[in-house]
Image: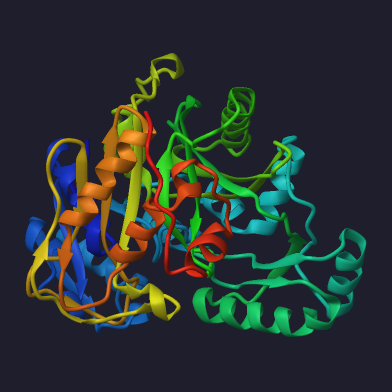
Amino acid sequence: MFAKVLIANRGEIALRVIRACRELGCKTVAVFSEADRHSLHPRMADEAYCIGPPQSARSYLNIPNIISAAEIANVDAIHPGYGFLSENAQFAEICASHGFKFIGPGVDSIGLMGDKASAKHRMAEANVPVIPGSDVVESEGDAIRFCRDVGYPVLIKATAGGGGKGMRIVGREADLTAGLAAASSEAQAAFNDGRVYVEKLLVHPRHIEVQVLGDEFGHVIHLGERDCSVQKPSHQKLLEEAPAPNLDPAVRAELLATAVKAARAVDYANAGTLEFLLNEDGKFYFLEMNTRIQVEHPVTEVVFGIDLVKWQVRIAAGERLSVRQEEVQANGHAIECRINAEDAENSFRPAAGKLGSVLFPGGPGIRVDSHIYTGAEVPPYYDSMLAKIVAHDRTRGDAVLRMRRALAETEILGVATTVPIHERILATSSFVEGRTFVTWLREHVLQSHRPVGAALGG
């Protein structure tokens, strides 16, 4: 096991990794920007180093400064968390060249699966179903010809990154030029890579993802699926749950087996997630692979009783995966609500400022992952997530009721949050019935300020 691990991240995921390392007996090193000087992650780590000004490009994306901190602290390994440099193959390679183990998959896996276009090609070669899509768009003419072949609507997507950045829906050829320009510009700003490709847009699909775990000896397992269909209009996830409701058992079995096959096809080692779109006809298609820990990993942890972050560290340290597929058994249902500093009534505009009173829920079956506290500053420079509230219970209906209770107990003053929109979601009949899809939030909740209440059954 590693003696000391540096966490190249901030916020709740930095705390999550610090706690896992501490339970494994590893000392921890935090890095922080000047804006995060009074945050919890530098206070909870054994050591902490400032790596730059508030702007991400000058701190959490500043590879030389992060490596310098790792050298000063004499760490064995670096955990990237999610976001920032977590799927940056160059960063993983630099870590290795300086003698630090990157806690994540190999450089080749990150590079291959981090580029959506190359990932789709590799999955198609492995006989994993993929959505009809173009190569990287080299010219407007190529894009026009592809769209005419597959038919509108289409989705323009950035080849790099994620989180809904660099994506545009185009419903007719007259809007294609503007859509390509907008998606490329946003991708360039977010990922320093303006390349985009085009794929056929499925109407009302569900977003289902499969958690996989592989060691460096070729052993790969799945830990069930998560439904991530409740998404903001920007395509960013807002609520996730496990297992996916109303999923045909035969489709589930095929989906899980396909995810394991996909991970093995790229010699995947560590925690990763295969994301799929499930069409209304029961067919599913590969969307992308996230070569890192996911924001929504807690719902899988509480349902399956397996600590994914600890296994990330153990696998990177050279341990064999001792969990066998037949031992992976779901226990109950879990729902995660992302509590962001955002105003859902104003297009989810991010909020910043000093927090007043902060009160989180407790009691049976409730888990809260957060980095905020009363009086903390919410800086304007980073992702707006404040906390993740997870409710776990015997059935999905019970988990919904438990989450309603948890949200009612939550108090975060000083900035707008997504607590009210979550309360509306959980009171909407189609959510209670497990009938959501990727545009459901916009079509069934945001267009109505009066949600339909529904009785819950077991």
**On the picture, is 451 further left or further right than 149?**
left
Nearest the eye: 210 or 138: 210
Q: Residue at x 58, y 76 (%)?
A: 187
**On the picture, is 212 further left or further right than 394?**
right
Residue 344: x and y in percent read: 39, 73
From what the image shows, is residue 251 above or below residue 22? above
**On the picture, is 428 further left or further right than 399?**
right
Is residue 114 visible in the rendered image? The answer is yes
Nearest the eye: 310 or 327: 327
Nearest the eye: 419 or 157: 419
Q: Residue at x 54, y 77 (%)?
A: 192
Residue 91: x and y in percent read: 42, 62
Nearest the eye: 48 or 276: 276
From what the image shows, is residue 265 above or below residue 191? above
Is residue 307 visible in the rendered image? The answer is no
Q: Residue at x 67, y 73 (%)?
A: 195
Q: Quadrant of residue 182?
A: bottom right
Residue 334: x and y in percent read: 34, 38
- Determine the residue located farthest toward the top in the rendered image: 326
